[in-house]
Amino acid sequence: MALKTLGQFIIEKQADFPYAKGELSRLLRDIGIAAKVINREVNKAGLADILGENGDHNVQGEAQKKLDVYADEQFIEALSRGGECCYIASEEHEEGIDLTKRSISTKGKYMVCMDPLDGSSNIDLNVSVGSIFSIYRRKDPEQPMNTAEILQFGHEQVAAGYIIYGSSTMLVYTTGKGVNGFTLDPSIGEFCLSHPNMRIPEEGNTYSVNEGNYLKFPQYIKDYIKYCQMEDLATDRPYTSRYIGSMVADLHRTLIIGGIFLYPETSNYPSGKLRLLYECNPMAFIIEQAGGMALSGQQRVLTIKPTHLHQRTPIIIGSTNMVRKVQEFMTRDQ
Ligand code: AHM
Ligand code: MG
């Protein structure tokens, strides 16, 4: 079978967008380029001069960068240079970055929310990490850019994706017409279509949650965890517990073999830990597009109205039947 690269695939699919003049395709291509550069550095993470806390110095006396800062810079550079993006919200920056106010003048119609390197506490441990992105279209690109414009509903995303730097590097994305996955072939330096039309199984037997927080979980989550652990041949329980602590890696597994991932509210974090704009919304869009579900409680994640860039939300996401089961426990608990 002939290889299809990410670039070829994006061009082929361009006709899918009613308003497309190639801009979104170029934006996706820019993200793919940044991903390759970040991948190169992530793969070198064990080599001395990139490891270490930000502010340390390497042997040449140059300031070292943590990989999450490096990844952030790569995305910003690629998106600024590309010219299709006018605004970036990043986990690494308190405020959004308005590219229309930078010297590089841009008429870009798209805004990007991103977590440049998620799960970065895992880097020094050689555990998979990822990048997450979410793309919105400006409602009126003729008007001056206004920060509040990025606070759109998750269901208004025009595209979303992630890159997983794992045993191989993959880029998975959706533009609202299914989910496709590409594996980086290091010998040619290209992402190649390896997982066309990804579908999450309706049912799974893996649950993924930080059980160290058990005592702080609401009752319905405790009940659901106990349900997962109970023996029942008919439903293939007890389920297997898997928790990497890298959202991208935990959800990539969930997407491929089915299962459920939960980061619920806890007694000390009433909104959970994960961020709506650049973690939960893009992942919810991808999982829904693959046939799964994503809730923040009784509400669909994609229908939460964002009020600020770094807003958090609880999340229960994965195979439809498993998410519905949690919903049942929640309803009983109310
Ligand atoms: P980060 O953005 O600071 O890396 O935190 C997000 C990560 C997710 O990848 C992961 O699902 C979660 O934090 C794990 O949190 P915890 O260690 O509380 O289980
Ligand atoms: Mg993160």
Image (cartoon, rainbow, N blue to C red):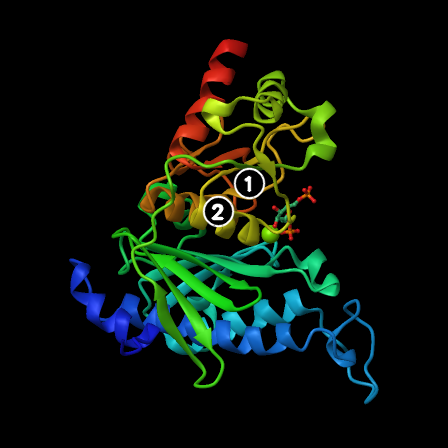
Q: Label 2 neighbourhood size at 10 Å, few (<14), some (14-19), many (20+)?
A: many
Residue 267 in view (yes/no):
no
Task: Give the vertical position of 306 relative to 140 (above or below).
Answer: above
Query: Residue drawn 21% across and 65% down?
Result: 13
Residue found at the very far bottom of the displayed protein: 60
Residue 117 locus on image (x, y percent): 59, 61
Where on the picture, by quarter, is residue 23?
Answer: bottom left
Q: Nearer the viewer, residue 142 or 3?
A: 3
* Residues tagged 2 and 1 counted as in contact (Cβ below 8 A): yes
Q: Which mark is residue 277?
A: 2
User: What amino acid is found at the position of numbered circle 1 in the picture?
Assistant: Gln
Residue position for label 1: 311
Q: Is residue 293 left or right of residue 95?
A: left
Q: Amino acid at mark 2?
A: Leu
Q: Is residue 237 above or below residue 288?
A: above
Q: Does 308 sit left or right of 143 as displayed? A: right
